[in-house]
Amino acid sequence: EANSSVTSKKEHQRRHTQNSRAKLNSKFDELLALIQPLYNVDRRHTPHRSEVLDYAIHAYNDLTERKIFLETEIALSSEKSLNTYLKSFVESNMDITSVLEFYVSMICAKKQWRHGEVWRPNRSSGLLTLTGSAIHRTVMGEELERVRRFLAESRSLEIRPPEDLIGRVFVTQRTEWMNDLEDAEVFVRAQSAKNASLKSVFALPICDRNNNILAVTTFFSQEVREYDSTTVSLSSELAESVVHAFDEILANKQGQASA
């Protein structure tokens, strides 16, 4: 009787395993059917499950990138749309670093920068540190690992203005565009940038309404990008709109709290 019970349990487990595998196989077949038209997968060849998952990850990243791009396009279509979009985000993220990360992600999506950074001064020391970043959704694989290493190395830095590109922009409050990242005297992360295959950087100061500097944002590319006045203008105008929205909502919340 005991043996019969053990046999019955084993049979139940076997059937459960078979059913689970069948359901999993069915889901992979459904996933493959969705992916094949998107990536022209050879129907004569059945991809390995890991390949199907790779295709699915690519598809997810593509859709997310398109979503961000479309949201950015809609937001930038008019001043009213931009204000509505910014206020919606800022109201749920009353932290200036999070808001600036959001801004950086919008510029990366709109202007195809591979990644962007937010550098802010430490309140006590005045030294500039990396407090936020955003990576373009199409950055994957080895490139993603290189960018992550670059950011990790950057987080260990403390820059004293007017040292380095970051410090210069913080002091002058003027944008800088560099296509030579190999001189460590001008750009302290020269070796890290070389290891990450970075070629160009665009640095933009972020100031409040009273022209007090809040942060320096930087945008990097893996190819040499010539100076583009349209990118500079768009980035500057959007930064001004983001800070304006933050200040307005912050003032409203403080007014409500004191009422």
Image (cartoon, rainbow, N blue to C red):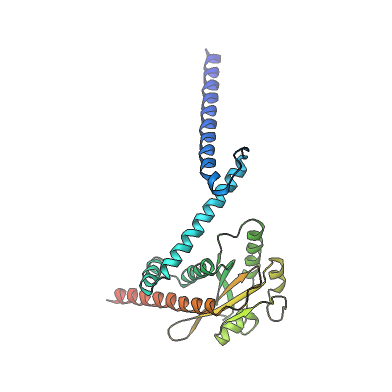
Q: Nearer the viewer, residue 108 or 70?
A: 70
Left or right of 72? Residue 14 is: right
Q: Nearer the viewer, residue 22 or 206?
A: 22
Residue 255's x, y, as percent? 31, 77
Residue at x-position 41% and y-position 68%: 75
Dividing the picture into quarters, in which one does residue 248 lie? bottom left
Residue 80 seen from this side: yes
How many marks overall? Answer: 0
Residue 153's x, y, as percent? 66, 67
Residue at the left extreme of this rendering? 259
Does residue 145 lie above or below 228 as drawn?
A: above
Does residue 169 lie above or below 196 as drawn?
A: below
Left or right of 160? Residue 2 is: left
Q: Nearer the viewer, residue 66 or 214?
A: 66
Residue at x-position 44% and y-position 63%: 71
Dividing the picture into quarters, in which one does residue 245 lie? bottom left
Residue 221's x, y, as percent? 62, 69
Residue 102's x, y, as percent? 48, 68
Residue at x-position 51% and y-position 37%: 27
Residue 123 seen from this side: no
Q: Nearer the viewer, residue 256 or 132?
A: 132
Dividing the picture into quarters, in which one does residue 140 lie? bottom right
* Screen quadrant of the C terminus: bottom left
